[in-house]
Image (cartoon, grey):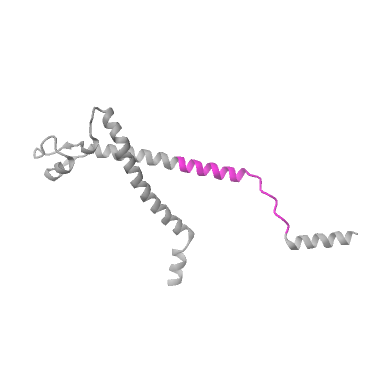
Amino acid sequence: MFKEFREFALKGNLIDLSVGFVMGAAFTKFSGSFIDDLIMPFVAKLSSGVDFSNAYISLSEKVPAGLALVDAKKLGPVVAWGNFVSIGINFLIVAFVMFLVVKSMNKLKKKAAEAPAAPAAPSAQEVLLTEIRDLLKK
């Protein structure tokens, strides 16, 4: 049973999946920072200074207007629509980047498939048989 598990764990597909998962986690942090630190300040500037990280709609009278989102959540239920907008933009960027990656991989695969295959060198046995045939012809 241990041998079967070891074979399963060391299969190439599982290793590839693990590498992809780790890269995905790192890319998520990267894209989150890209959105929060680079894109959203420009969106806030274009939208007359609306800070989307603190944009919410209060569902309770206990939450006074103008509180930070973190504090508002402590006092009552809120709809954090600004966070949703940020995550939506993040999703679109990640989806677009993944589209570009898949498109480029498909392009590379297509080029590899279209490339003419080099003729395989004859094996040592074929070379020997060819020499024997040529000698017999003489």
Query: What residue range appears in magenta?
Result: 100-122
- Residue 95 in view here: yes
User: Could you tell whether 57 is left or right of 119 in the image?
Assistant: left
Q: Residue furthest right?
A: 138
Image position of 10 (left or right of 112): left
Q: Quadrant of residue 41?
A: top left
- Tell me: residue 125, above or below residue 69: below
User: In this view, which residue lies farthest toward the left?
Assistant: 62
Answer whether residue 105 is magenta in the image.
yes
Tell me where residue 129 appears, x and y as whole percent: 80, 62
Residue 1: tell me if it is visible.
no
Q: Residue at x 19, y 37 (%)?
A: 56
Residue 131's spot in the image, x, y percent? 82, 61
For the point 84% across and 60% down, the residue is 133
Q: Is residue 16 above or below residue 64?
A: below
Q: Quadrant of the N terminus?
A: bottom left
Asked if the stretch drawn in magenta spans residue 95, the answer is no
Q: How many marks?
A: 0
Give the main secondary structure of the magenta stretch: helix
Where is the C terminus found, in terms of image quarters?
bottom right
Residue depicted at x 79% and y 63% = 128
Where does residue 65 sit, x and y in percent of width and height? 12, 34
Left or right position of 105 against 27: right
Identity of the residue drawn at 51% across and 44% down: 105
Choose top left, top right, bottom left or bottom right for residue 37.
Answer: top left
